[in-house]
Amino acid sequence: MTTTGPAPRRRMRADARRNYDRLLAEAAAAFAEHGVEASLEDVARRAGVANGTLYSHFPTRQALLEALMRDRMEALAGTARDLLDHPDAHEALITWARAGIAHAAMYRGLATSLMRSIEDETSELHAACQAVLTAGERLLERAQAAGAVRSDATASDFYTLINALAWAGEQTTPAQGERLLAFAIEGLRPSARP
């Protein structure tokens, strides 16, 4: 992962840490209200700092998203690892798919940003997205080994499907989003062969 701004775990002066934390809090509020394409200048204004302060901490929108989503993406990868112990491999995969959809639907436009980041190795979000994809791959392989999921499905297919369903959820009702998930899960089942 390319780190262009100060890592949040690195020591900062107290005033820099307050600015960093305020910027993250205001970005979360702005993204919740307006989606991930919210004005970064508005984020800085709401945090009470100059644009230069925002860009010194987060040189790009992707760097801000990475800092905002880091813990949540680590938690999503951890959920996948925890579900490896679930007795039903298919149910574990569905449970994780729902968690992934909820994660990607957190902010309007996030699913699109995550899809771009998995393909762009220079994106600040790439490593976190790759960790989530890798964690999901283990669940997918386990479901395939159990015969619950078609063998030609890849982790990339599944990651794309989760993000597509999150994007679709932005455009539809929760009930339709749930139906779309059911259709997708059914489409992943191995077809009956004579």
Image (tube, grey):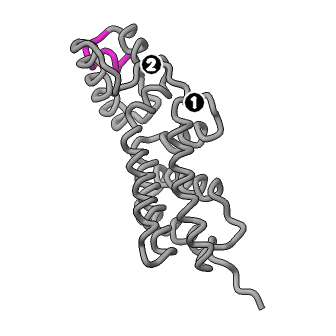
Q: Viewed as shown, does residue 38 lie left or right of 12? A: right
Residue 41 pos. (x, y %): 39, 16
Residue 49 position by quadrant: top left
Residue 44 x/y as whole percent:
33, 16
Residues marked 2 and 1 touching at CB (< 8 Å): no
Q: Secondary structure at mark 1?
A: loop
Mark 2: secondary structure: loop
Marks 2/1: CA distance?
13 Å
* Left or right of 113 on screen, residue 46: left
Q: Which region is colored magenta?
A: 41-49
> Whole-percent x and y of residue 140?
58, 65
In the rendered view, tell whether residue 167 sits above or below residue 158.
above
Quarter of the figure that contains the N terminus: top right
**Residue at the limit of the structure toward the right, as seen here:** 194
In terms of secondary structure, what is the magenta stretch mainly? helix
The residue shown at (64%, 53%) is 156
Quadrant including the C terminus: bottom right
Disc 1 marks a residue whose amino acid type is: Ser
Which is more toward the observer, 107 or 78?
78
Q: Which residue is mark 1?
A: 123
Q: On the picture, is 123 further left or further right than 10? A: right
Residue 5: image tag: 2
Q: Residue at x 50, y 24 (%)?
A: 3
Callout 1: 10 Å neighbours few (<14), some, many (20+)? Answer: many
Q: Residue at x 52, y 35 (%)?
A: 125
Q: Is residue 47 left or right of residue 76?
A: left
In this rendering, the answer to whether 84 lies above or below 40 is below
Name which of mark 2 and mark 1 comes first in the sequence. Answer: 2
Residue 32 lies in the magenta stretch? no
Amino acid of disc 2: Gly
User: As rendered, which of 41 and 70 lies closer to the eye?
Assistant: 70
